[in-house]
Amino acid sequence: MAIDCAPGLAPAVALFRSLGDPTRLAILRRIATGEARVVDLTGELGLAQSTVSKHLACLRDCGLIDYRAEGRQSFYALTRPELLDLLRSAEQLLAATGEAVALCPTYGTPAGSPAEVSA
């Protein structure tokens, strides 16, 4: 029996998909500590400028971050403090389950994979 995704779930699905990308999650975790410029993120996360910019645009489109311009620089920050609560809750859930979700055969990462090692 197929389960139709209720229309009311679509925004939540989009939110969790936006958080499900390792690069976007790393960017959000960094921005959660304070404002950051693209140059800060590229240096701290070891990513290309184009990669960071692409993911920042996605996060802005989702309404999770925004920026303020100061001269020629843009400083990115979270738009909603509730996102910090969500990230903290996720960390608590992972700690409580012993990070068992990492063992999920569909969404988990095999032990020693690059995603696990860099996390």
Image: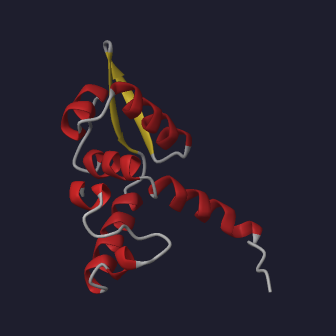
**22 is higher (above) or lower (below) than 88:** above
Q: Is residue 116 left or right of residue 23?
A: left
Q: Is residue 117 left or right of residue 61?
A: left
- Residue sitting at 31 percent across and 85 percent down? 97
Q: Is residue 52 left or right of residue 14?
A: left
- Residue sitting at 60 percent across and 63 percent down? 13
Q: Is residue 40 left or right of residue 2?
A: left
Residue 110's image quarter? bottom left
Quarter in which the N terminus is drawn: bottom right
Residue 9's image quarter? bottom right
Residue 102's image quarter? bottom left
Q: Nearer the viewer, residue 114 or 37?
A: 114
Give residue 33's position: percent from left, percent from top.
22, 49
Give residue 72's position: percent from left, percent from top.
32, 13
Residue at the left extreme of this rendering: 44
Numbered marks: total = 0
Q: Nearer the viewer, residue 82 or 112?
A: 112
Residue at the top extreme of this rendering: 72
Which color mode does the image show?
Answer: secondary structure
- Residue sitting at 47 percent across and 69 percent down? 107
**3 is higher (above) or lower (below) than 47:** below
Quarter in which the C terminus is drawn: bottom left
Give residue 8's position: percent from left, percent from top.
71, 68
- Residue sitting at 49 percent across and 34 percent down? 57
Give residue 75's position: percent from left, percent from top.
31, 30
